[in-house]
Image (cartoon, rainbow, N blue to C red):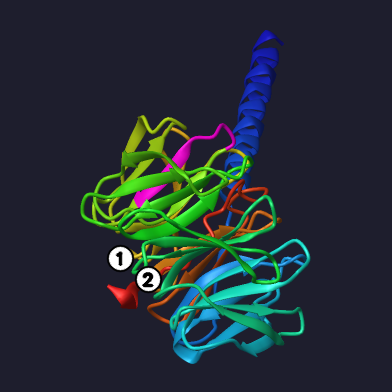
Amino acid sequence: MERGKNYLKFSLCLLLLLIILIVAGNINNSANAATVTNFKVGKMPYGLAVGKKNNVYAAISGFNNVVELNQNGKLIKNIIADWAPSGIVINKTGYVYVSTGIGNIVKLNNKGQILKKVKVGVIPAGIAVGPDGNIYVTSIHSKTVTKLNPALKVLKVFYAGIAPYGIVLNDNGFIYVTNFVNKGTVTVLNRSGKIIKVFNAQRKPEGIAIGHSGDIYVTNGLSGSVLKFNPNGKILEKINLKGGPYGIALSTTGSMFVACIYADKVVKLSRSGKVLNIYKTGENPNFILIDNKGNVWTANSGDGTVTKISGATRGKEFFPYKGPIWQDSF
């Protein structure tokens, strides 16, 4: 009888252990489960933006158009924008703003009609919507940031460094700009466009994003690193990352998603820089964003696709880097 009881206890323990392993496995699989899908969109897609219905807009530089896709990658609109569209943002009222290779900013309504074009410098390289609703555009060859209201009236043009490229704004309206030069920097400007700080950011910094605590994240494709700065410009972390880290987006949990343009992948990193996951994308992913459903998207200039990574995170990023990736100008 005693032997039978011991066997029953042993069997129950084995069953309990099996259940624990299955549950743990399911939790782990759930946490890491992601589906990667590529959608063909046209020659050389660069900028990406997400609209109110979580439709994704891609600027197709090689075909002079902007395409709107639903979450399943179905083409909703094909919009002729201007020559070589690259950067794209959408404001709260649904208007679409596109930077183009001939130096224009184009405003489109939700039907895809061009409402206005404004010259903003020689090859605009980055575009963002500020918390004030105004549009901010960097021009790498003009060394400027142009500030425009939603109607595309130029409000101010100010110097932002030798080669202003990526751009992002924080909640207070401060402007952060990467300068794409060998001894790269980040220029910080106040709401009036006055430079209040410049700090070193290694060789040719490109993408830039701001976290919930105000920390600044900068990608350096040629240096193979992601730098994390505090608001005063002190380096908190240097994360070595092979494959040309380029575009960067932050999730609400603090994870970093970095598009590696030379390795055809997106790397998910923890706040401390630990690699959490790697996702295969189309060729040469440059711009990256996270939509309101937590899907990660990249524009892949090498094979004319957009990649959707479903289930990689939850929630949109805080202050996404909205600039395009304009490779042809260098």
Tally of marks: 2
Q: Amino acid at mark 1?
A: Tyr
Name the residue beneath numbered marker 2.
Answer: 284
Task: Quarter of the image for the N terminus: give it.
Answer: top right
Residue 124 drawn at (x, y percent): 44, 71
- Position of residue 240 in the picture relative to residue 9 (left or right): left
Q: Is residue 100 visible?
A: yes
Residue at 61%, 46% (x, y): give it: 318
Which residue is depicted at the point 58% across and 43% down? Answer: 170
Residue type at mark 2: give it: Asn
Label at residue 262: 1
Q: Which residues are magenta?
A: 212-219
The quarter in which the C terminus is drawn is bottom left
Q: Which label was assigned to residue 300?
A: none
Q: Are marks 2 and 1 in contact (CB under 8 Å)?
A: yes
Left or right? Give the position of 183 relative to 217.
left
Q: Position of 2 compared to 258: left or right?
A: right
